[in-house]
Amino acid sequence: KQSELKGFLGKETLTADGESVELFCNIGTPKDAKKALECDGEGIGLFRSEFLFMDSGHLPTEEEQFNAYKEAAVTMDGKPVIIRTLDIGGDKDIPYLGMKKEENPFLGYRAVRYCLGNKEAYMLQLRAIVRASAFGKIKIMLPLVTCVEELRAVKEMISDIKKDFDTNGIDYDKDIEVGCMIETPAASLIADILAKEADFFSIGTNDLTQYTMSVDRGNADVAYLYSTFQPSVLRSIKHIIECGRNAGIPVGMCGEAAADPLMIPLLISFGLTEFSVNPVLVLTARCIISKWSKKEADELADKIMSLTTEAEIVAALKEASKE
Ligand code: PEP
Ligand code: MG
């Protein structure tokens, strides 16, 4: 098995019928970008920037953040680096920010909501990312979007930053893309609306599953319901990819499901164009992708989408598995 995987090192990521897809990595620190390269990742599909904030005893300055984003961009040497802006709240607390205790932290003041409520600090992060875009192919991604106003508000801040940089002769990538994570039922349901104003989507199945199933990601008592193979979650994923394709924007996935051997054929059928996985899973994912043609994946997906329970779906996927 390991020797079979080695054969995929340095290869393009292709389906059995030769369709090319992108295979990126999820990372938490700029140092992890080296790991992503060593593991043969073709880019960074999710840089969880909150780790910079959690590993520091103070709000990282613009300069500190700039250096971190620049390091990731330089390491990846022109390959895409999708930086997700601060995703805190929920289960991630940062003591020095003095966030309030909430009754329902996962439904509360978190991620893009928190950032837009603290624009001065958010401005530092966006400035640092836009500055770093002069050193590679950086893209900006917003977590936990639920309505188009959030995307518009961030794009407006970025456009102000660009004007300021133009005035002051600061270099940046004028075509820097701004995309949304689709990880809430709200964003999924308005994916057609968001797709008109976002440059790309990335599906966050960890949260999408939690919110679609109304199941706390960390609660063992309800863990039996937490599955990306629930018909509701699969319909949502299919719908998001369709909306992205209809609008002509790329759709990736950076939740854990992107590396799940049982999920991969469905994603190929739905038309996902970018898979972002833990670096150690790059070769496994490339190997599984290589085993499925669009036609075969479509036949399987048609069958799967007609089933009514998670148990039937998982059983059918295991039976069809090529592992
Ligand atoms: C997700 O929700 O699927 C995701 C990738 O983000 P995180 O796991 O960091 O919440
Ligand atoms: Mg998430």
Image: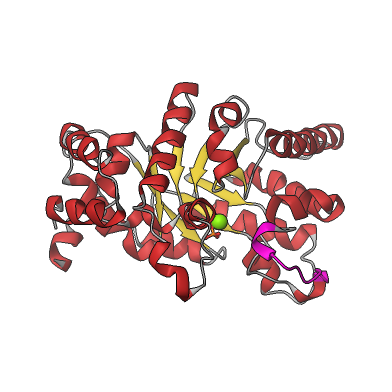
Question: How many numbered circles does the render carry?
Answer: 0
The residue at the point 25 percent across, 59 percent down is 284
Left or right: residue 24 versus residue 314 is: right
Residue 13 in view: no
Q: Position of residue 22 (x, y in %)?
A: 37, 42
| Residue 99 forms part of the magenta stretch | yes
Left or right: residue 109 versus residue 271 is: right
| Residue 231 forms part of the magenta stretch | no
What colour scheme does the image use?
secondary structure
Q: Is residue 216 above or below residue 288?
A: below
Q: Is residue 271 above or below residue 39?
A: above
Q: Position of residue 266 (x, y in %)?
A: 28, 43
Q: Position of residue 164 (x, y in %)?
A: 85, 36
Q: Nearer the viewer, residue 168 or 29?
A: 29
Name the dominant secondary structure of the magenta segment.
loop
Left or right: residue 167 versus residue 31 is: right
- Furthest toward the front, the residue is 308
The residue at the point 50 percent across, 43 percent down is 202
The residue at the point 82 percent across, 32 percent down is 163
Q: Nearer the viewer, residue 231 or 187?
A: 231
- Give, as a single range, the part of the protein colored magenta: 97-107
Q: Position of residue 249 (x, y in %)?
A: 49, 28
Residue 104 in view: yes
* Quarter containing the N terminus: bottom left
* Quarter containing the C terminus: bottom left
